[in-house]
Image (tube, helix red, strand yellow):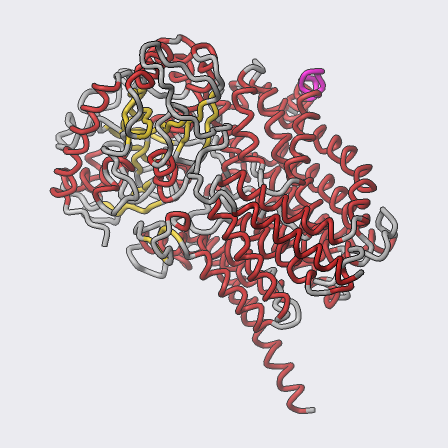
Amino acid sequence: MEIFQGLIDGFGIALGANNLLFAFLGALLGTAIGVLPGLGPAGTISLLLPVVYQMGSSTTTVIFLAGIYYGSMYGGSTTSILLNLPGEAASVITTLDGYQMAQKGRAGAALSIAAIGSFIAGTIGVIGLTFIAPPLAEFALSFGPPEYFSLTLVGLVLAVFLSGSSVSKGLLTLALGMILASVGLDPITGKLRFTFASVGLQSGFDFTTLAMGIFGLGEIFYNLEQSDVMGTVTTKIGRLFPTASEWVQSRWAILRGSIMGFVVGILPGGGGVLGSLASYAVEQKLSKHPEEFGKGAIAGVAGPESANNAASTASFIPLLTLGIPSNSSIAMIFAALLIQGVTPGPFLIVEHPEVFWGVTASMYIGNVMLLILNLPLVGLWVQLLKVPFNILGPVVVLLTVIGVYSTSNDVFQVFVLIFFGVVGYFMRKFRFEPGPLPMAFVLAPMIENSVRQSLLMSRGSLGIFVERPISAVLLGVFAIMVISQLVKALRSRKRSAAI
Amino acid sequence: MKRFHKAMGVALTAALLLAGCGGAKKEATPPAGNTTTPAPAAQAKAWAPEKPVTMIVPYSAGGSTDVLARVVEKVWSKHVSVPLTVVNKPGASGWEGRDTVAKAKPDGYTMFMGYGSGEDLIAPQLRTATFDPIKDFTPISLLSAHSVLFVVPADSPYKTMQELMAASKTKPVNAALSGVGNLMDISVRALAKAAGAEITGVPFAGGGPATTAMVGGQVDVGPGHPSELMPHVKGGRLRILATATPERDPSLPDVPTLKELGINFTNPGSLKGVAMPKGTPAEIVKFYEDTFKKISEDPDFKKGMADAFQPVIYKNSADFGALIKSTFDTYTQMIKDLNITVK
């Protein structure tokens, strides 16, 4: 078959010395920036573009840049688990159970399962890319504003699953996240909202600053209050690898997460967040011990980590099959290809098969490299936890402040970071789970934009959401989820009233 | 001992936070090692940069302006001894990056790409900007102009612009816009008025998502720049109906102009030039003027621009400045005619 021939040619290209080297460098660099808070793959790719022009071959260019991109997904989970510092939206979910596992001495298992899950997910993603990319890309194109609205609405309900024991507190947190998201420029009319005449707030709050503040700084501020934490962070470092029972709990989570992440990751702009969120919610629902979630359930790390890695691989599909970039990192790869004379689009596979197949084959190799890179490092990372809190804490503060300042060059953002740290502190003090806040923060603008775009398209008719099949199905899912939650709540209230 | 540890922890944390907040008077300068050295005092000899130069692109990556900056970046080292750093600073619909440059020091190390776009000449006339688009900048050179093309999805039933305009009188017609109050927004309104049609503009978060909506058939028509649309036209997913330029585009000889089709709307396109903060000394302006002239004549640059579907149009500082002012006035008139307000 053509596909196998293309794949064989692709491996021939990807296994060339130059391409192997750059795949490795990309993966290494990607992991490094994933671990460091602040600089993300988009910023790094932007800085490296002048370098890649010297590479000569556009295949090598994409191999290198792609390696940075999916490598950063591997690295992002490291800080989430060890330091409660999510690097990007998709890693937020990993902090919920991953950090708890680290607190209980299971950091090694969490890191390993994240690496293994990411490897499996990445490989599944590349297989999907190889065989079913074109029809999936067409499917992605049929997602217009009404479909995005319905999908993100489902995402919002899923975010409620992150609220831990008190759903009402979770809803409050969700609402707070939505309010914070509305600060800034209104995307449809261009008016300023809640900016109080501050230039720094004109673009609204930056997600990374918010996440690092609420999770990272908030945790540190809260810990400062506890006098017994000053000695060490964890009492013991357990086994570095997951136990057999943990592995059994995780393997289906990995599979399910990979598929969910892959499907959602194809959608331009949607991607990683929704995939991880959906995976977490599904795993919680299917788990035999749902009460463990939020306290260190390994499936809560395995599923979402797999989802966000599958999503990052899937986000290459629109680029390679249709020439549509899904996010800013991929947009820069798009620009790099364009100015080297390779026009991304449906004919890329025909006009430049060496680029398409070379990159695809390189992704298989890249995933293997990342696994080999990350698994041995688990032992090293875990040693970090032996550092006593009164040194580790300020170091984390230093890293987050540097991370925020270096990407924004604006001291105002450091103040914003501290503000969110204080918010995170109070949330922990009053036992509010922080998870729903960043989720709502990411989803709310998408919901708002898509509903307003949809209503413009339909001239104000709400029918557009149910007339289009995909949107109708998603709204149906939303309705079912909300109704089932209500029924459950009513039933348990009836039961406790009857007692 | 425990209390001492606690105090140490608090003190260290507080110290680090305060250190991060210190130096708050520093203005936002891009991360290219820009320290605040004053402009060289030697007026007699020609100026040349001694440390890396930063070019800000006030849009996110992958858009037509970003691509233009990347092509410049590609050939930069052949003409200038110091490196160029391209920094994307999207935000506030293209104003955040511009605001950064408006408030930067006019020392020849900070510039932005994209001067002359709708965000400079149109949007500030609709809402208050934090900078004055004419007074706060020194125009350096024009490098390109991104014309406005009108495209439809490949499977659209409309074969010509007239069919589309006629259909709009009976059915709702949607157009994808890359933003609010920018050139695309105005073009759609002007087109609708000139053709007596009714088109609703649906704003998207930039050229990328808007193009995706067009390719996906989510909208009926869309204005866009060749750089963003041509890959899809070549790929057979989009069809061009017309161009808004006064004359036919030489790279697209089969595309009629709106004027030819009897629709009285022309627009030379979004001017894409380089600008520096106001008060930039004349010898710095001269250096960059000459540099960009050499870049615009560089064959690698021309090839890169051709691959990116962007024309190379060079103007020096004085001509560019004059063009900016006259284009600004044209838009003032257009805004009045079209009765556009941001409520």
Question: How many numbered marks appear?
Answer: 0
Instruction: Please state the horizontal and vertical placement of residue B280, each as a whole percent of the image.
Output: 31, 25
Quadrant of the snapshot with the N terminus of chain B:
bottom right
The quadrant holding residue B331 is top left
Residue at point 57%, 44% (across, down): A265
Quadrant of the snapshot with the C terminus of chain B:
bottom left
**Residue nearer the viewer, B167 or A418:** A418
The quadrant holding residue B227 is top left
The range drawn in magenta is: A11-20
In the rendered view, would you say B285 is above or below A494? Answer: above
Instruction: Please state the horizontal and vertical placement of residue B68, each as a whole percent of the image.
Output: 39, 23
Residue at point 61%, 20% (across, down): A60
Residue at point 36%, 49% (across, down): A187
The quadrant holding residue B101 is top left
Q: Is residue A461 left or right of residue A320?
A: left
User: Quick check: is A427 in the magenta stretch?
Assistant: no
In the rendered view, would you say A478 is above or below B111? Answer: below
Residue A257 visible somewhere in the drawing: no
Q: Main secondary structure of the magenta part?
A: helix
Instruction: Please state the horizontal and vertical placement of residue B45, each as a whole percent of the image.
Output: 35, 9
**Residue nearer the viewer, B109 or B295:** B109
Instruction: Please state the horizontal and vertical placement of residue A223, each as a whole percent of the image.
Output: 70, 61
Q: Is residue B243 left or right of residue A466?
A: left
**Residue nearer the viewer, A52 or B31:** B31
Q: Is residue B183 left or right of residue A200?
A: left
User: Quick check: is A14 in the magenta stretch?
Assistant: yes
Residue A23 visible somewhere in the drawing: yes
